[in-house]
Amino acid sequence: MTFCLNPKCKNPQNHDSATRCSSCGSKLLLRNRYRPIKILGQGGFGITYLAVDEDRLGTRCVIKQLLPKLEGNSDRQQASLDKAVQLFNQEALRLCELGEHPQIPTLLAYFEEESRLYLVQEYIEGQNLWQEMEEKGAFSEEQIRQILQQLLPVLKFIHDHHIIHRDITPVNILRRQRDGLLMLIDFGIAKELTRTSLNQTGTKIGTQGYAPLEQLRSGQVYPASDIYSLGVTCINLLTNVRPERLYDPLKGWVWREHLAKRGGKVSERLGQILDKMIKDMVSERYQSAEEVLKELNASPVASAPPLPPPPPLLLTSPLTASATRSRSNPIGITPVPPRKPLSPPLIPTSKPQTRGWRCVHTLKGHSSIITSAAVSNNGLLLVSGSLDKMVKIWNLNTGELLRSLAGHADAVNSVAITPDGQTVVSCGDDGSIKLWSVSSSTLLASIPGHLRDVNAVTISRDGQILASGSEDRTVKIWELKAISNSQEIYPKRILSGRAGMVKCLAISPDGSLLASGGLDKNIYIWNLVNGELIDTISGHLNSVNALAFSPDGKLLASGSKDKIIKLWNIANALQIRPFASLERELIGHSDMINSLAFLAQGSILVSGSSDKTVKLWHLETGKLVGTIAGHLGAVNAVTVSPDGKTIVSGSWDKTLKVWRWFS
């Protein structure tokens, strides 16, 4: 079954392989790839469909179509429409800012088609906790503890990103069928927490009974507001009684009475924790998810396994025995000995040690997530791309913003700079590749080279070849000189025929090989001279997000959504087939790998991850020799200076950080 997305269609049901609606003639494949197959739900803001992504081998996904119900006069209808669009945009923005978290559905796409807004998300198969309660009855204390143990870290994660969910209810907590993991869904009314929002009234929105008074009365929200809603959700599940019946205007909360009526019991300690979570006064509640977890884990009754210790939040300084936190180093540097518990931060001494990686600049100029970064061969310029559609050029030494290049119609996904430092190349969701003059900031060329979003660009070391990879499943090879000298631009070669969209590219130092990776989990090695596919490398369990060749061209590093970095020996690439052999795996990140870069000496690999850290690995031993922390969100890009003494990281927190080695 294929559903027509035209809201005015009288007979929206079509057969499985249809491309046009038999009733109204509308296109059935959204963006020529998403096929709606079932209505999952309808509400005041629109319709939610189960769909399949035909570009990802029929993977299931969820389509949310904005279709608000408008009532009243024209002014009121316009106001309602504006609010609906605002909330819809807000959900997409929040999901995008949060990146990928194992307990939050991933945002796959957000766009407008035929004057209607759509949001495409990862499909999670399972039941929400309200459905579980309806089928199986009230939850036990052990189940409530498990809910808190699983969801409080998620709240910490979103609050660390300055986002308040504002609608935590049993309906918005989904238990994933395949592994029982709880997922937090529906960020449609989530709010970004800012200094001004703490002092201003906002939209009075949320679910009656679960939302705290400050949210319903004035629209003000805090991390403690989500803690309140989670607490009410827990007592709702514990008693199988709706929240409005659990509160008496004269007595206050009476959930214990309802629990006793059904013969249920709860330990005094858990009861005290729940009581504090649902206090009316914000100041009397727990102020953070960490506070609740601390008391929950200290409770004598431990029905759920304790959480693992948090990862180090400071810098593990490679090749140094001591380091300190000082005024000149606000991020902080401290050694983390292997196989030992994390020590508390060191107290500054009268003679601080400065050897190690230190943040010398935090660059703020982009208004949205940083997606990519590149350093010029002379080490003077830094180029960055962002979801804000901008390309920016910075002075790497001073941190000064030199140029802002506007021209992309959508998010910028990747940037590169030619070896002579004269031209910047960028690509984005608008399907174009753009060439910019560094000196004049002018657009030299715009190539509509792909049918869909262009995710990656890379340039050969000699500056002759540009490669681009796209969601249209192709890699295109371009001659940079031909682009500069021609009005009509055509690729020199198209590498295609492989499943899955391309997410990353790398060209070997000698220019003989091209590596591509993407959603199908494989790495493809191509002969860059004749376009022949030399080898297909399998091994990752999820999409390949990053690739990098070592300076000597003998190793290829790959980073994946599976959180693992793999090193492949490709020394005999053109002589032996299949030639790639797995040298070793680098395991240490707690979230997916987004970017890779080799330091100039070739003995150290740098990786950036959604766990908010940059890690340094010694290639000969495979050991982790350094961890750099300081970003508030996922690290989406890492790049290094030619002398190997500077690392730049770009993050979902909208900043670039310049890290310099001090010896």
Image (tube, grey):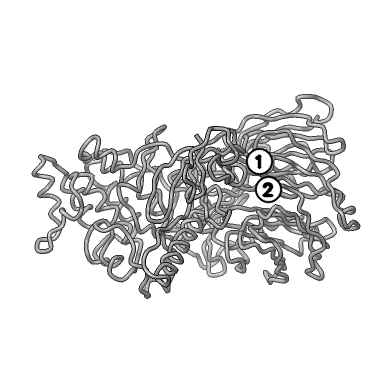
Q: Is residue 228 visible?
A: no
Residue 499 quadrant: top right
Disc nearest the viewer among 1 and 2: 2
Q: Disc 1 on helix, strand or loop? A: loop
**Is 394 left or right of 172, judged from the image as shown?**
right
Quadrant including the C terminus:
bottom right
Q: Rate crowding at label 2 as few (under 14), some (14 to 19) or many (20 or more) other CA atoms within 10 Å.
A: many
Identify the image quadrant of residue 180.
top left
Q: Can residue 493 be seen in this view?
A: yes
Sequence-wise, the earlier of marks 1 and 2 is: 2
Dot 2 lies on which element?
Answer: loop
Q: Is residue 161 left or right of residue 646?
A: left
Residue type, label 1 = Met
Percent position of residue 334, x then y: 52, 55
Residue 588 image point, x, y percent: 54, 41
Q: Label 1, label 2: how many angstroms apart (C-alpha)? A: 10 Å
Q: In this view, does 658 lie above or below 149?
A: below
629 vs 203, left or right, is: right
Q: Residue at x 26, y 50 (%)?
A: 233
**Amino acid type, residue under disc 2 in the picture:** Arg
Total numbered labels: 2
Instruction: Kindly check if marks 1 and 2 are in contact, taking CB atoms under 8 A apart as contact.
Output: yes
Residue assigned mark 1: 501
Frontmost residue, 489 versus 632? 489
Give me the disc on residue 452.
2
Q: Nearer the viewer, residue 176 or 486?
A: 486
Of all residues shown, which one is farthest toward the top? 577
Assess disc 1: are there few (<14), some (14-19) or many (≥20) residues with their C-alpha within 10 Å of its C-alpha. Answer: many
**Who is closer to the viewer here, 523 or 290?**
523
Give the image location of residue 435, x and y in percent: 79, 59
